[in-house]
Image: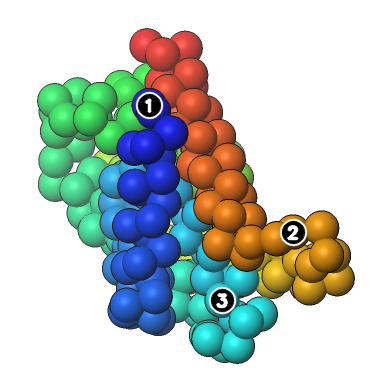
Amino acid sequence: MSISIISFLSSSIISFILKFSYLGIFILMSLESCNIPIPSEVIMTFAGFLSFEGHMNLIGVIIMGGLGNLFGSIISYYIGYYGGYPIVNKYGKYFFVSHKDLISGVSWIGKYGDFVVFLSRIFPIIRTFISLPAGILKMRMSKFIGFSLLGSLIWTSFLAIVGFYFGYKWKAFSGLIQSLSNYILVLIILALVFYILRHIISFRRKD
């Protein structure tokens, strides 16, 4: 993927958050949890930075990110509940979700229990597709919502605080950085490149 495309995607995410504020965070994080390849690392880190700048409230950013994750996860849960293996086998490749991903998720939940849903929310890669096997196994909805929300809040808190911290460091070393916009662009491009490469490599290995 070229730098120009990455820059465009990064700028689109930034513009969306700047335009729609908390609602933008909710929508983007919902899509991310529906297995749409929109990196939460970019969404929440930038939102955390905006909270440092005073454009948003850090707690509000974390909560909206967590609720967005939960909403998207519920949608994915029902896709797994009603669609099962056939829908993932047919469309999963377009969202970096392979048949082996699904088998692994079902196996983990079956072996270690529903708590896997919570643990998966705080780890990259597996956090976005664990809702599908949870739905296939028809995990109790109350448990699914509780574990998903708690894990998602931990994840969104971590990323938002990272963004807030980078804002602090920028202020502390502002003499070393001539352009704030360039700094943010580089930070987001690096996060997005890492996200895409990580998912592509993981998907190819599992296939």
First reached walking from the N terminus: tag 2 or tag 1: 1
Residue 96, placed above or below residue 114: above
Residue 197, placed above or below residue 136: above
First reached walking from the N terminus: tag 2 or tag 3: 3
Residue 116, placed above or below residue 22: above
| Colour mapping used in the image | rainbow
- Regarding mark 2 in the picture, which secondary structure is present there? loop
- Residue picked out by circle 2: 177
Percent x, y for residue 113? 53, 45
- The amino acid at mark 3 is Leu
Q: Distance between the Cα atoms at labels 2 and 1?
A: 27 Å
- Residue picked out by circle 3: 50
Q: Quadrant of the N terminus?
A: top left
- Residue picked out by circle 1: 1
Identify the image quadrant of residue 137. top left
206, 3: nearer the viewer: 3
178, 4: nearer the viewer: 178
